[in-house]
Amino acid sequence: MDGEKLFATSCGWCHQDGGRAAGRGPKLAGSDRTDEYLLNRIRVGKEGAMPAFAGSFSEPQLRAIVAYIRSLKDTHP
């Protein structure tokens, strides 16, 4: 499962530089949010801010995206 590719094609429009910088969405590199928080946010979204992706990704795909987010180096303070 390629979490980086899944992220790039669905999340990268708002989370800039592969999630390493804020754009329309927040920077994800270095996030102190729990994996469960991130999984839930991806699944259900946030009204007015982020679409829900529960119907777009399988559970293994969601976990691959979170694993990708966890792998990011925080290069933009």
Image: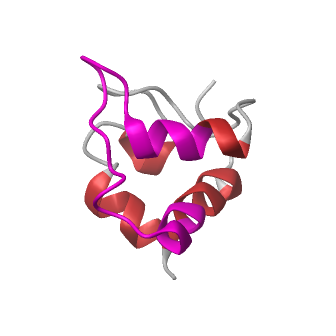
- Is 67 placed above or below 5 here? above
- Is 12 placed above or below 4 here? above
Q: Residue 7 is drawn in which quadrant?
A: bottom left
Q: Position of residue 19 (x, y in %)?
A: 48, 44
Q: Nearer the viewer, residue 14 or 74?
A: 14
Residue at image position (48%, 70%) is 61
Q: Is 36 inside the magenta-drawn segment? A: no
Residue at image position (60%, 55%) is 66
Q: Nearer the viewer, residue 10 or 53?
A: 53
Q: Residue furthest top?
A: 48
Q: Position of residue 42 (x, y in %)?
A: 44, 44
Residue at image position (31%, 30%) is 50
Is 25 left or right of 64, judged from the image as shown?
A: left
Is residue 74 visible in the rendered structure shown here?
Answer: no
- Is 59 placed above or below 28 here? below
Is 70 left or right of 7, judged from the image as shown?
A: right
The part of the chain drawn in magenta is 38-64
- Is 15 placed above or below 23 here? below
Is residue 31 visible in the rendered structure shown here?
Answer: yes
